[in-house]
Amino acid sequence: MSTPMSVEQYRDLILQDVAALPSAQLPLAQCLGLTTTATVTAHVAVPPFTNSAMDGFAVHAEDVASASPDNPIRLQVIGEVPAGAVSDEWVGNGQAVRVMTGAAVPGGANAVVPVEQTDQQPGAAPLPDEIRVNAAVGERANIRLAGEDLAEGDLVLAAGVLLDATSVAAAAATGHGTLSVIGKPRVAIIATGSELVAPGQPLDRGQIHDSNSIMLFGLAQEAGANPVSVSRCSDTPAELDQAIAEAVRTADVVITTGGVSVGTHDVVKNSALADVLSFVRVAMQPGKPQGHGVLTSPDGRRVPIVTLPGNPVSVFVSWHCFVVPLLNRLAGRDAETAIRWARAVAGQDWRSPAGRRQYIPVARLDNDLVVPTHRLGSGSHLIASLHLADGLAVIPADVDQVTAGDRVDVLMTRCWR
Amino acid sequence: MSTPMSVEQYRDLILQDVAALPSAQLPLAQCLGLTTTATVTAHVAVPPFTNSAMDGFAVHAEDVASASPDNPIRLQVIGEVPAGAVSDEWVGNGQAVRVMTGAAVPGGANAVVPVEQTDQQPGAAPLPDEIRVNAAVGERANIRLAGEDLAEGDLVLAAGVLLDATSVAAAAATGHGTLSVIGKPRVAIIATGSELVAPGQPLDRGQIHDSNSIMLFGLAQEAGANPVSVSRCSDTPAELDQAIAEAVRTADVVITTGGVSVGTHDVVKNSALADVLSFVRVAMQPGKPQGHGVLTSPDGRRVPIVTLPGNPVSVFVSWHCFVVPLLNRLAGRDAETAIRWARAVAGQDWRSPAGRRQYIPVARLDNDLVVPTHRLGSGSHLIASLHLADGLAVIPADVDQVTAGDRVDVLMTRCWR
């Protein structure tokens, strides 16, 4: 047999020739979790006009330079500017205009005195004829200049950005109602194995509950993809070929689990599908047997397929190493987007297989210590305890023993912390 | 005026008397992102039966103790166990049964020899009459014991757990098809302000684009809530009261922005709504003026309302400090769930307001350095650059100057890393 590939070699092989999906112009409310395909520049400046940072009075700073509680300065109030309105009044010396936070600063004024620094009560009140100011303010005090956040034409968002609440808000603030984006990759999931029974159904002898398909359904959502179909099939090759034919119709990528190893009944290897796949051994534990290829949909789209091993922890590890980068690529963003690494310290000893890179589920304790989530370490069948993991400690292939206190790199996998 | 409250005091005030929403029993595929309301124990052990960790042959370890390439040991093959099946054959001394990964280990055998350590080819092949084993294996080698991950009756998930892909998979693997969960809190969002214009629409003088409502729509999704309605209203009190009446019908919580400060036209303060609200000043920057209360829906549900300030960065900061804990509480989980903190080091100097805790948007550079995302620091109007932030550096109220090299705590706010 040939030498196993490294994780990086295999990931690059999967990504080879995979292009981003087509883009569309969508309203902002539909853009969350999608990826920009073009740079976004400001159509309007932020703020779009010079405005007040406080509720108060627009004044000439020099008029109130000597103001204090003992020496209040009297100013004539000549009008007001509520939010959303403008005033064409000119504020002359000795004069003031009442302004709300965010209101345009009227001409002539060069500072805003907060209402709390006058003799006026905060809140709703009729417009007074005059006010007494009891504190000095500097020129430009409490004034936000047009464009001081971002000027018209400035870059707001680069191409290839995964859009979250704040980036969509930035697009809104700079005059955009729609963006050119790539939608969530549609994922078809097929769990193979004659031993699999649907969750909640009774088990016969030799059977287990299928946890892979529900896990992949969730992982796809957590990775910003759209799991459009989920199915289970036995180790009968014709059944798998049928499931693949269904999946490829609506999916942008197909993920299978199981049937890729060296067993006699390994369905993926025995099906017609095997003709379009390359099977690879990767120098990792768990997750060694892997397969990948490209299918063609009835309407002529190239649909990548990744055939993962069947053990649930192998599925989880393979997902993070290979499928997340593939989904990123399909969505038009950098393959490493949203993949988080942390440096940590081993909180106990554990063994790692020689010659293969270990990915071991670990929980993160306080002060950056990590410990395996199960006494059996990186066993690929430990699905019931995998949810305790905050990440996967990654132990180099040439290390066979981790000792408490060793520095370890951790691929963070918890979606919500 | 009274002394401003601390962030923690105000958060506790909002949470006071807020109870978890009703629960429901839902299929696993609908449980992602929801919260358990009861402990989940294993209905079946994982693995449910003792099985093979490899594709190979179930044998007596003592039969092959002296096996090597130079001294292969011949065994008689008496049957096979594909995955999902069982064998009632008894493996006697000198005998072997072919097994697939995950298949039940037949009686009598006490070890599995991987196919690679025999004279058999990996992959599909007819069942041989006999094999030659060319390596010794220890007792229990390549065998997974029933219940070695989790035994029947063991705790799988606690109550109050936010369910992700792996925790739902753990429930599936341990025999559950449904879980008792609390659904995503339904959020109604109302942005107030006569100056607000829908994203993408032309601006008149004195107007700005509403970025708050789209940001809250996104933040609600990122926090695992369900934004069921989004509306905008002017500074006319009757319009706001109408919007509130609509919102409370379908929402579990109502969030408004704007109109809570000391201005003459502050709509929330001037509306009928003000009668059920408490207005509070919080010793934070941005985000000082806040309001909260409890509404009653037409069908008699208590619906908390939080009235945030109007400046976008204030909205963002207030969301993380007050609304995320409230959503956690409504969803039946610990108020701090999914709130991530990091320790970092200031990468440059910046000023912080005396007497108020600063929440300043920062980008995280390599090696844990953080720098403000904008030269204007924590200005509450800097919406177009907020998306550059990985988190909010939190500077204590008694600090007015941060110096490069200072340790700072960072509330991590980026949803996808």
Image (cartoon, coloured by chain):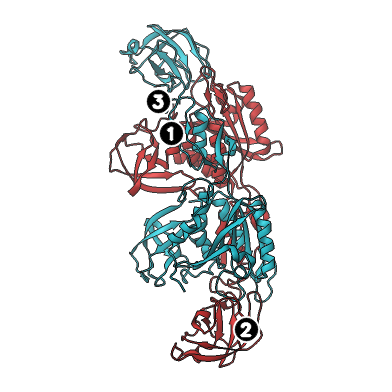
Chain colours: A cyan, B red
What residue is shown with label 2?
B127
What chain does mark 3 sit on? A
Residue denoted by label 3: A148
- Mark 1 and mark 3 on one chain: no
Above or below — where is A67 with respect to A321? above
User: What is the residue that sits farthest to the bottom in this orientation?
Assistant: B93
Q: How many marks?
A: 3
**Which amino acid, by three-letter code, is at mark 1?**
Ser
Where is mark 1, residue-wise? B385
Q: Quadrant of residue B18?
A: top right
Q: Which mark is residue B363?
A: none
Give the CA separation, mark 1 to mark 3. Answer: 11 Å
- Give the percent coordinates (x, y) of residue B199: 56, 28
Q: Secondary structure at mark 3?
A: loop
x and y percentages locating residue B16 in the rendered image: 54, 42
Please report the residue visible at 52 percent of the width from the left and 20 percent of the height from the top: B207
Tag 2 subunit: B
Residue B337 visible from this viewpoint: no
